[in-house]
C-alpha cells in the first residue's frame, strides 16, 4: 500500500486504486485531502482531527463516501444519517478494500480536571496503526506515532516506540511545531530508530512511502 503524510495527523492510504483517509482535521491545510477517498476514519472529536464542515461538504460532493468514527463523533455528525458509522474497540470491518480493526477507547489526559474524550485507533491490514491521541499498544509493523502534543512529553513518545517495537514509524501530530521543533523531532526519531535498528522518521506533508 502507499502511505502519504498530509498536514498534522492526517494520512492517506491507497491500495489497488482504492483510498481511505484518516483524520483530516483543522490543521490539515490540503484542500484535496479527502478527494477520491471512499472512506474517512476519524479517531476523535478534537478540531485538529475532526473538521465537521469539511466532512459534510465532502459527503455532499461524493455519494460513495462514508465516515467511520467513535460514537461521540458520530453523534456530532448525526445530521448526515447512515453515511457516518459508529465503531468501537473490538470491531473489525472491511473498509474501501482495507481490513480495519478498531483498537482503543479514550484520549490521553489533557487536563487533570477534564475527563478524556472518546478516542479510537485504526489498525489497517495488520500493517499500519494510527492511534489517534493515545498511546495504545498494538504490535504493528508500521506505527503512526504522535510527535508532539499538549498531552505528551518526548520521553513518552520514546517509551511508546519501545513498547510497540515497530519496524517503521512515521511521525504524525506535528502541526504545532515550528522548524526548530520539527528538527528536534526528526533527531529524536532518528536516534531511537538507530537504537532499535528500525526506520523511524518524519515524512513531510505530501511525501509518500510504499509499505
Image (cartoon, grey):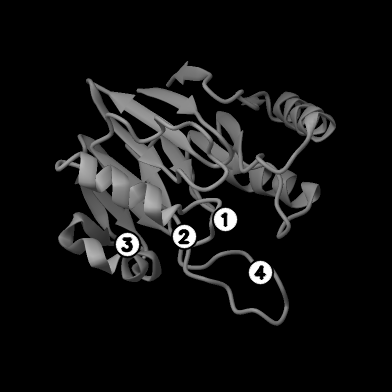
Task: Give the Cα separation between the discs numbered 2 and 4.
Answer: 14 Å
Instruction: Find residue 90 and name its label.
Output: 3
The quadrant of the picture occupied by the C terminus is top left
Q: Callout 4: helix, strand or loop?
A: loop
Q: Callout 2: helix, strand or loop?
A: loop
* Relative horizontal placement of residue 197, taking residue 84 as reference (left or right): right
Q: Residue at the location (36% across, 55% down)?
A: 102
Which of the two discs, 2 and 1, sits closer to the camera? 2
The location of residue 148, given as percent across then percent down, is 71, 46
Q: Residue at the location (48% across, 18% down)?
A: 209
Q: Which residue is identified by label 2? A: 44
The location of residue 37, given as percent across then percent down, is 28, 34
**In the image, is residue 14 above or below residue 148?**
above
Instruction: Find residue 133 and name its label.
Output: 1
User: Which of disc 1 and disc 2 is earlier in sequence?
Assistant: 2
Quadrant position of residue 189 = top right
Which of the two discs, 4 and 3, sits closer to the camera? 4
Q: Which residue is identified by label 4? A: 109
User: Which of disc 3 and disc 4 is earlier in sequence?
Assistant: 3
**Marks 4 and 2: in contact by CB < 8 Å?**
no
Q: Residue at the location (40% across, 56% down)?
A: 52
Which of the two discs, 3 and 2, sits closer to the camera? 2
Task: Give the Cα separation between the discs numbered 3 and 2.
Answer: 16 Å
**Marks 1 and 2: in contact by CB < 8 Å?**
yes
Amino acid at each position: 500500500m502507499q502511505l502519504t503524510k498530509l498536514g498534522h495527523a492526517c494520512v492517506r492510504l491507497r491500495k489497488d486504486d482504492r483510498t481511505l483517509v484518516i483524520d483530516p482535521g483543522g490543521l490539515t491545510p490540503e484542500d484535496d485531502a479527502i478527494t477520491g477517498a471512499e472512506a474517512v476514519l476519524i479517531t476523535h472529536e478534537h478540531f485538529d482531527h475532526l473538521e465537521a464542515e469539511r466532512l459534510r461538504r465532502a459527503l455532499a460532493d461524493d455519494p460513495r463516501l462514508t465516515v467511520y468514527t467513535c460514537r461521540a463523533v458520530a453523534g456530532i455528525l448525526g445530521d448526515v444519517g447512515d453515511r457516518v458509522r459508529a465503531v468501537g474497540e473490538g470491531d473489525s470491518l472491511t473498509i474501501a478494500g482495507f481490513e480495519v480493526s478498531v483498537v482503543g477507547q479514550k484520549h490521553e489526559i489533557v487536563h487533570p480536571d477534564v475527563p478524556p474524550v472518546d478516542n479510537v485507533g485504526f489498525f489497517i491490514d495488520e500493517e499500519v496503526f494510527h492511534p489517534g491521541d493515545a498511546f495504545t499498544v498494538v504490535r504493528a509493523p508500521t506505527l503512526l506515532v504522535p510527535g508532539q502534543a499538549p498531552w505528551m512529553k518526548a520521553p513518552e513518545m520514546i517509551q511508546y516506540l519501545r513498547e510497540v517495537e515497530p519496524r517503521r514509524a512515521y511521525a504524525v501530530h506535528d502541526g504545532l511545531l515550528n522548524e526548530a521543533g520539527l528538527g528536534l523531532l526528526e533527531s529524536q526519531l532518528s536516534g531511537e530508530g538507530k537504537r532499535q535498528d528500525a526506520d523511524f522518521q518524519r515524512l513531510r506533508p505530501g511525501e509518500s512511502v510504499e509499505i
